[in-house]
Image (cartoon, grey):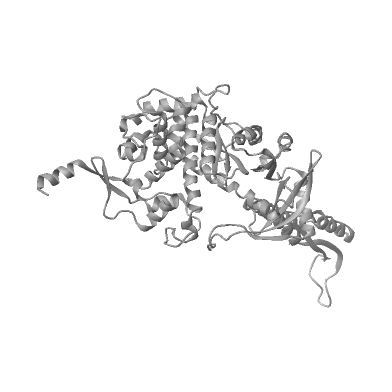
Amino acid sequence: MSNSTAQQFVDDSILLRVGHIPAVARMCHRLGLIDLINESIPCNTDIDLGTLVTGMICDTLSGRSPLYKVEEFIAEQDTELLFGTPVDSHSFNDDALGNALDRIHQKGTLKLFTEVSLKAASVFHLDTSQCSFDTTSVNVWGDYDDSHANQKAPHITRGYSKDKRPDLKQFMVSMLCVEGNIPISGKMQNGNSGDEKLNNEELQRIARLLKPLGQNITELTYIADCKLITPENLKSLDNLQFISRFPATYKEHDRVIEQAIDADQWEELGILAETPSPSIKRQRASYKAQESQVTLQGKDYRALVIQTDHLDERRTKAIECKRLKEKLLIEKTIKSAGKTTYHCPNDAGKALELLTRKNKNSYWHITGTVEQTSIYAPGRAPANGPRKIIGTKYHLCLHPEENTVLYQHKLKQAGCFVMITNTTKDKMSASEVLKTYKQQYGVEKNFSFLKEPLIANDTFLKKPSRIDALVFILLVSLMIWNLMQRELRKSEQVSSGQLNDLNKRPTKRPTSYLLMSHLSGVIILKTGNTRHLTRNGIKPQGLNYLAALGFDQSIYTTPPSPSKTQRRP
């Protein structure tokens, strides 16, 4: 090759660090996302809405850059490799993205996300027999003076902040997930919405949501936290099974715990965590259970008292604070009582009895004795005998004593919580009830994805309607991310031990983050419309992770077929 030919080859070529993004784009294509969005929201713009949404999802899952940098992100990508057709990066400018968010909001984010989630449930054959619901608050900076309660867009205002930031305005996000962490319903809610009301709204629409999938509402198990248990919500739960935490505000809560501790007849459930072997800093919790029953609104429910060796940190801290406070009060009482002098033994005895009886049901109580002291006549003792005693005085010798029985009893209570359900014992054991409820952790983990400050606040989206649409983008991104993880864990590569973690050890629980890490160094050389992997190519673990998703290295060299509704350049 001559120097001029070589220089021409260099001029016509470009190196692109693509990483895991082609795999993300192919998951969107497998879902049929571009056609679904375009058919739901037709538009006559230069670039179709489905391609814009897919680009925003790829950007979101590229490392969480703010939305206003999407144009920069697209400029560094092989757009034909991602979308099936080449796209000018300027098509992803701020105005285009803003208009896209406006159209998504006008369509209705809940309706649109339901369409996407139902398609995902059908394509990936998701198990929708168990649904977990939860909410979170997302803090935002700004006045949002144009946000009002009666508008179509959710109201951004102050409410109960789950991040302990009542000084900031917020909006809420509700999410219904299947298989632990895959969202099939979710939307932005008013900032002052209560979990009790949001649970009720979800219960009212869940039958309509699952009907297209042929899911019978009577076969569904609804999982939520303790805010689910209200008189109004219990009426809506008559037609479906549910599992929840029993609120400590009910008197029955303390009764069944006391009853279980007194009976001391626990069923060993053992360690339920699926995580690898515990570390020194974090040991896995072990559980015991005891069946009981509670009556609410005239109806009996199954109550499971769960005892764990991992004590509730907030409850144990409250116990320790009260214990220390009572000790300080006891010491103060002892100091004050010790200064009192009695001239009658009966008076001293009554005072002692009153003090020792006063705190019998506290963490500390007073014990002591009455001691007498002789009162001598003034002057020096005579040389031939003892000093003359002219009287006797009495005082109390007191000290604090800990009520260890009460302390241990309270610690046992701190290690207990109550599950409430209307499932029968023959259909779901205590261990299965607790395992099912622990799927709620997957929903809570999803919220950390949605509350990234760069995503929620640094996008300069000052319209509540556009934030509503942005939440839709984040929910779909979260769905894609968790679907990738699901496919990895269901693959043959897991059972055969071909997928490693970052320490090069086989893992049974691969994650999308591990996929991203093993593909992070992938670079392609693009010359004209031809693509080649560089000499290093894709490392063996990267190929294994791709195979677990059902892909191979051709997704880095061969663009996907364009979607039928896509705009062509």
Residue 132, given in percent of the width and then of the height, sits at: 61, 43
Question: Does residue 183 show up?
Answer: yes
Residue closest to the far bottom:
384
Q: Is residue 347 left or right of residue 244?
A: right
Q: Is residue 182 left or right of residue 388?
A: left
- Of residue 145 and residue 338, the one placed in the foreground of this image is 145
Residue 204, given in percent of the width and then of the height, sits at: 66, 32
Q: Quadrant of residue 247?
A: top right
Question: Does residue 331 show up?
Answer: no
Residue closest to the far right:
346
Q: Quadrant of residue 461?
A: top left
- Of residue 320 and residue 341, the one placed in the foreground of this image is 320
Residue 479, given in percent of the width and then of the height, sits at: 50, 41
The residue drawn where x is 26% and y is 40% is 529
> In the picture, which quadrant includes the C terminus?
top left
Query: Is 483 rendered above or below residue 143?
Result: below
Query: Is 518 rendered above or below residue 280?
Result: above
Residue 279, given in percent of the width and then of the height, sits at: 53, 62
The residue drawn where x is 52% and y is 27% is 108
The mark tally for this picture is 0
- Of residue 274 and residue 221, the one placed in the foreground of this image is 221
- Of residue 296 and residue 477, the one placed in the foreground of this image is 477
Q: Quadrant of residue 561?
A: top left
The residue drawn where x is 48% and y is 30% is 469
Query: Is 509 rendered above or below residue 561?
Result: below
